[in-house]
Amino acid sequence: EVQLVQSGAEVKKPGESLKISCKGSGYSFTSYWIGWVRQMPGKGLEWMGIIYPGDSDTRYSPSFQGQVTISADKSISTAYLQWSSLKASDTAMYYCARHLTPGTREKDAFDIWGQGTMVTVSS
Amino acid sequence: EIVLTQSPGTLSLSPGERATLSCRASQSVSSSYLAWYQQKPGQAPRLLIYGASSRATGIPDRFSGSGSGTDFTLTISRLEPEDFAVYYCQQYGSSLRAFGQGTKVEIK
């Protein structure tokens, strides 16, 4: 079964760092772009960025460039989303998702989604 | 930056009725790189349609997508109880892969 399994919910204080993970299984992890999508409480979906685990080529939305870092460790089929200094406004559900089509084409829909990681930032 | 505007914000319908959801782009979406997703409360989104009109694997044929350029439509031919959810369109043809703000399909 093709699936993405994300790390568990996090509660952090403003200014702390955080790295959440997304482990792929059931497919060739290095052959598909993986992206991250933010959903703030009660709000819609926001595309944050994508990474191609085969060579770690990365693209960011301008809204998130410099605010987060997307990375991947292909040896353990895991993608990451990290913050160096969290803000209260980072409180949201974060989903990882896999591109529909294998290969280096970077423009694609997301067909497989993780279950989401809830990040709460509060003093 | 392409902005997607979905309408209506909420659609109140009964099971068995036809649902027509609109997604309008501020600029032409290249190569019909337009997808539709369904999201139920407490769940991750699910891909329904990609390439404006291709159904994703396992999606019932009561879901169909159409349109090109700046105007796209998701049609649910006969609403089943499990179809009441929020639907998002997304364009993935430009560097900023924006989502629309969503249309909630609720039971009337």
Image: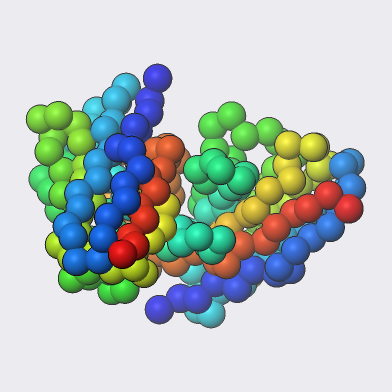
> How many tags in the picture?
0
- Report x, y in % for residue B8: 74, 68
Vertical placement of residue B95 versus A109, above or below: below
Would you say residue B47 is visible in this rendering?
A: no
Q: Is residue A52 left or right of residue A9?
A: left
Q: Nearer the viewer, residue B61 or A21?
A: A21
Would you say residue A71 is visible in this rendering?
A: yes
Q: Is residue A12 left or right of residue A100?
A: left
Point 46% across, 61% down: residue: A40
- Report x, y in % for residue B66: 66, 56
Vertical placement of residue B30 versus B49, above or below: below
Vertical placement of residue A75 versus A66, above or below: above
- Report x, y in % for residue A96: 35, 45
Q: Is residue A84 left or right of residue B54?
A: left
Q: Which quadrant holds residue A98?
A: top left
Point 78% across, 53% down: residue: B106
Assign the N terminus of chain A to one quadrant of the image: top left
Find the residue positioned furthest to the front: A123
Assign the C terminus of chain A to one quadrant of the image: bottom left
- Report x, y in % for residue B83: 73, 42
Q: Is residue A122 left or right of residue A39?
A: left
Which of the colour schemes (rainbow, by chain, secondary structure, one colour) is used?
rainbow
Point 26% across, 60% down: residue: A13
Q: Nearer the viewer, residue A11 or B13?
A: A11
Q: Which quadrant holds residue B40?
A: top right
Point 36% across, 69% down: residue: A89
